[in-house]
Image (cartoon, helix red, strand yellow):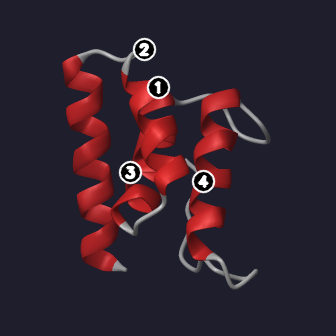
């Protein structure tokens, strides 16, 4: 799994979170993983990014409840560390 410890090199951390979400949603440079994609969109959305919230909602429509719960758990775990 791709690990991210520092985000925000560009000065726009939410933009980087969205890019990570897109990478996982589309399988760009990483294996496609809807749970990871949802996690990164969720983190950006929690920080106020409206686009990320929209993308998270679109992605959730393709996921089952167990997958969404796993994505939310991963987001909480990441946020508790960072």
Query: Which element is circle 1 on?
Result: helix
**Label drawn at residue 48:** none
Using the rendered view, name the quadrant where residue 24 is placed. top right
Q: Decide which of 53, 23 is in the foreground and name it.
A: 53
**Cα–Cα gap, marks 2 and 4:** 18 Å
Residue 77: % across, % down: 26, 62
**Cα–Cα gap, marks 1 and 2:** 7 Å
For the residues labelled 1 and 3, say whether their Cβ atoms are less than 8 Å apart.
no
For the residues labelled 4 and 3, say whether their Cβ atoms are less than 8 Å apart.
no
Classify 62 as above or below 57: above
**Residue designated by label 1:** 58
Q: Quick one: label 3, few (<14), some, or many (20+) residues within 10 Å?
A: many
Q: Earlier in the sequence, mark 3 or mark 2?
A: 3
Using the rendered view, name the quadrant where residue 71 is placed. top left
- All told, the count of numbered labels is 4
Query: Which element is circle 2 on?
Result: loop
For the residues labelled 1 and 2, say whether their Cβ atoms are less than 8 Å apart.
yes
Q: Quick one: label 1, few (<14), some, or many (20+) residues within 10 Å?
A: few
Q: Earlier in the sequence, mark 1 or mark 4?
A: 4
**Cα–Cα gap, marks 1 and 4:** 13 Å
Q: Residue at x 65, y 77 (%)?
A: 12
**Residue designated by label 3:** 42
**Residue designated by label 4:** 18
Residue 73: % across, % down: 22, 48
Classify 41 as above or below 48: above
Q: Residue at x 34, y 62 (%)?
A: 46
Query: Which element is circle 4 on?
Result: helix
**Cα–Cα gap, marks 3 and 2:** 15 Å
């Amino acid at each position: 799994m791709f690990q991210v410890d520092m985000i925000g090199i560009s000065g726009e951390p939410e933009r980087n979170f969205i890019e990570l979400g897109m990478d996982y949603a589309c399988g760009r440079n990483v294996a496609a993983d809807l749970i990871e994609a949802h996690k990164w969109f969720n983190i950006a959305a929690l920080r106020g990014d409206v686009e990320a919230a929209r993308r998270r909602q679109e992605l959730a429509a393709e996921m089952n409840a167990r997958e969404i719960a796993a994505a939310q758990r991963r987001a909480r775990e990441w946020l508790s560390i960072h």
